[in-house]
Structures are given as C-alpha cells and as structure tokens.
Image: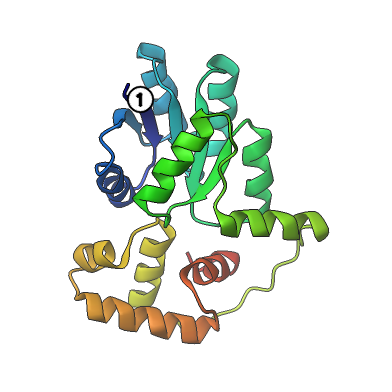
C-alpha cells in the first residue's frame, strides 16, 4: 500500500532536496506540495486522502505551527511531522502543542525521514536525536528571553551559504545552487565554524539565527 504524504515548504531548493531524498523510497507518494499553510489547507480541501504532512515551520501567510493546528482540527486522522532547521527553542514546544507527532531536522537523510514517517504512522513519536536532547535541556532549563546579538565578521558568501544550510540543503546541493565546487563549500563551512566557534551545522545555523544573521 502506498503512503500518501503532503509537503509544506516555501523554499524551492529545500523542497527539491526533500523530494530527491524521498524518491529512493517508492512506498512514498507525494500527493500535494504547498508553499505555505494556506495553500496546504486549500489542497487538503480538494483531496484530504493523505496519511501524513511534512511541515516546514517558517512559511509566509500561515506558518507551520498555525497550519499544524488547522490540519489537526479539521483532519485529525492526518499525522504531521515538523521538518525544519533548529531555529528557536519556543517553536519546538509550540509545534508539539499544536498537534505535531514529531520534530525532525531538514538535514536528516532520506532513510531517517522515511523511518520517522513509518514510526509515526505506526503510532510512535518521531524525533531527531539532537532534538530529543534539546528537549531534555529545555525541560531542565527555562528558555532565555534575552539574546546577545553579535557580529562574527561573516562574508556575504558565508551568509548565503548559511542560509542554504538553514533551508536544509546538503553540501552537494549548495555547491550546485551557488555554482561553486564541493571543495569550496567545505572550505566556506570550515571558515564559518571557526568564526562562529561551533563544531557542526546545527550549531552554526542556531547561532547565526539567534544573532539575526540568517
């Protein structure tokens, strides 16, 4: 039996990257794609024979949290998996409160996303390990409302690359989109890590987001 899903994602590069990763799993059939929550709801009104929605959080007109709440209110049988970069701590809880069944990172590979879909449809609660760890940290320590904004001396190209990382693209996809070599992408990422004083993509995007860079 095919698994019918819808994807709500406003970034065309991220959407195509997600489609490419899921294409390796023929059980998955993408019935709808939408650029925002309003478009998703219009699509579901025409055909709500959908098992699961992969939902971006940051979208224009209607964001992922509002869209999740609307979908679960009108179509409670449809599961929702939040698929996003790690932006802020508050979104993690709001997405779950809105009715999402899980919370994944856009950088998760196709196998991880597919397994999360299967686990969710089986009644589980899918969550990337790094998100699960962050959830525990947030339970132990309240969200800080004060953020220290800092300029890290990032170049325009590095900011462009960070934006691509925030949208969940792989190094190969970034090289193609920015028309640079894979080696150049790796070099830029090394420089970004050094300037931000972080050790991985997740922390780089989080720190850049916290400081209003991306």
Q: Nearer the viewer, residue 183 or 70?
A: 183
- Please tell me whether mark 1 sits on a helix, a strand or a loop: strand
Q: Badge 1: few (under 14), some or many (20 or more) residues near its Cα, within 10 Å?
A: some
Quadrant where the N terminus is found in the figure: top left
* Residue toward you, 11 or 120: 120
- The residue under the point 56% across, 45% down is 103
Horizontal and vertical percent position of residue 167: 40, 56
Quarter location, residue 176: bottom left
The residue furthest top is 46
Query: In this orientation, does residue 104 appear?
Result: yes
Q: Quadrant of residue 33?
A: top left
Judged left or right of residue 37, residue 183 is left
Image coordinates for residue 134, horizontal then vertical, percent? 66, 59
Against 99, is 110 above or below?
A: below
| Residue 29 % position (x, y) | 29, 29
User: From the viewer's perspective, is residue 211 above or below residue 150?
Assistant: above
209 left or right of 179? right
The color scheme shown is rainbow
Report which residue position mark 1 lands on.
Answer: 4
Total numbered labels: 1
Q: Depth check: 18 or 90 in front?
A: 18
Give the residue displayed 62% in from the left and 39% down from the top. 95
Which of the two residues, 86 or 156, is positioned nearer the viewer here? 86
Which residue: 38% across, 30% down? 6
Left or right of 37? Residue 12 is left
Q: Does the image show residue 155?
A: no
Residue 160: x and y, percent? 35, 68
Relative to 124, does residue 163 appear above or below in the rendering? below
Q: Is residue 1 left or right of residue 138?
A: left
What residue do we see at 49% from left, 55% from top?
Answer: 85
């Amino acid at each position: 039996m095919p698994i019918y899903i819808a994807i709500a994602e406003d970034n065309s590069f991220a959407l195509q990257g997600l489609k490419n990763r899921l294409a390796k799993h023929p059980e998955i059939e993408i019935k709808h794609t939408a650029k925002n929550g309003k478009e998703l709801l219009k699509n579901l009104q025409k055909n709500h024979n959908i098992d699961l929605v992969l939902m971006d959080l940051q979208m224009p007109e209607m964001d992922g949290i509002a869209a999740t709440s609307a979908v679960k209110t009108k179509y409670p049988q449809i599961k929702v998996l939040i698929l996003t970069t790690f932006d802020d701590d508050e979104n993690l809880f709001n997405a779950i409160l809105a009715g999402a069944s899980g919370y994944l990172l856009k950088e998760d590979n196709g196998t991880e996303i597919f397994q999360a879909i299967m686990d969710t449809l089986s009644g589980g609660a899918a969550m990337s390990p790094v998100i699960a760890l962050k959830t525990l940290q947030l339970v132990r320590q309240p969200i800080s409302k004060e953020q220290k904004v800092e300029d890290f001396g990032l170049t325009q190209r590095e900011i462009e690359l960070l934006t691509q990382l925030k949208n969940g693209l792989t190094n190969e996809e970034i090289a193609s989109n920015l028309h640079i070599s894979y080696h150049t992408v790796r070099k830029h990422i090394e420089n970004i890590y050094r300037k931000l004083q972080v050790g991985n993509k997740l922390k780089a995007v989080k720190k850049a987001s916290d400081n209003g860079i991306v």
